[in-house]
Image (cartoon, rainbow, N blue to C red):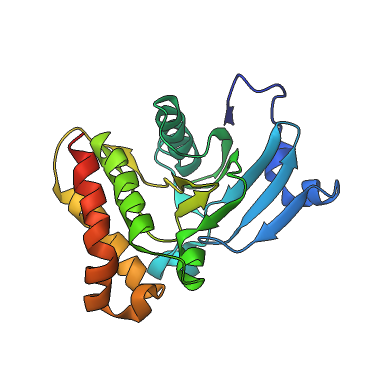
Amino acid sequence: MVFDAGLPEAPTRDWFDPAWWAGRAAVNTAGGGRGGVAFLDTPVGPCVLRHYRRGGLVAPLLGDRYVWNGRTRSRGFAEFSLLAELHRRGLPVPAPITARYMRRGLYYTADLITRTIENARTLTEIITARRFDSALAREVGALVARFHAAGVDHADLNAHNILVADGKLWLIDFDRGEIRSTGTAWKLANLARLKRSLLKVGACDHDEAMLDREIWTPLMRGYERNLEV
């Protein structure tokens, strides 16, 4: 385990067990990402527990198992460290609470607990409610630019991982993310992934020409203006 040493109460292994929290009426589960998440009412405040699961073609074969390649490179520890650094820099990310891995021979499983971003809606939910407009698109562009200016490569930039809470935008799920010092190809790949996601979840009724005109153009304006600051 690794955890924030400044917490008023040190986490225990039980914290990674939704059934343990359920016995205290302190957990809700929900779909989200691969395998879903559990929302916890912990002694240090509302938190989110995520158990790492594979996606893609290897998911049926490996499920939640990953090949062991060292402690610091385990999924939970790597994301915990990245979030801690981004949070230290003042970027809008969930604060990391604790992470763990459980090694079994050549494989391991991993979990991460972060603070809940309260009163949040995903950009996907906002699109579904037809409340995604050019003004919010500019804010999304500015958000992405802020991370790119800091060298942050988000491996899965999509509408599910952008949250809006009380007028502020946040970015979540930094699994496989990293901080880069150079290059532009990764920035373009992030943006292309985001655009595909917006189309997929129904922005502008899946009409790419309309998306370019009404959403993507203002989004890129917000991005370019803030990337230069």
Q: Which residue is painted at 39% across and 70% down in the image? A: 57
76 or 181, which is in the foreground? 181
The residue under the point 46% across, 51% down is 66
Q: Is residue 203 left or right of residue 63?
A: left
Residue at the extreme front of the image, as rendered:
135
| Quadrant in the picture for residue 83 | top left
In the rendered view of the protein, which quadrant contains the C terminus? Answer: top left
Q: Quadrant of the N terminus?
A: top right
Q: Residue at x 51, y 54 (%)?
A: 65
The answer to whether residue 65 is visible is yes
The image shows residue 128 at horizontal and vertical percentages of 49, 72
Quarter holding residue 56: bottom left
Can residue 54 be seen in the rendering of this structure? Answer: no
Image x and y of residue 217, in percent: 21, 62
Q: Say left or right for 156 vs 209.
A: right
Q: Nearer the viewer, residue 8 or 60?
A: 8
Task: Tell me the residue at 60%/64% (across/down).
Answer: 31
Q: Nearer the viewer, residue 78 or 85?
A: 85
Q: Is residue 86 left or right of residue 47?
A: left
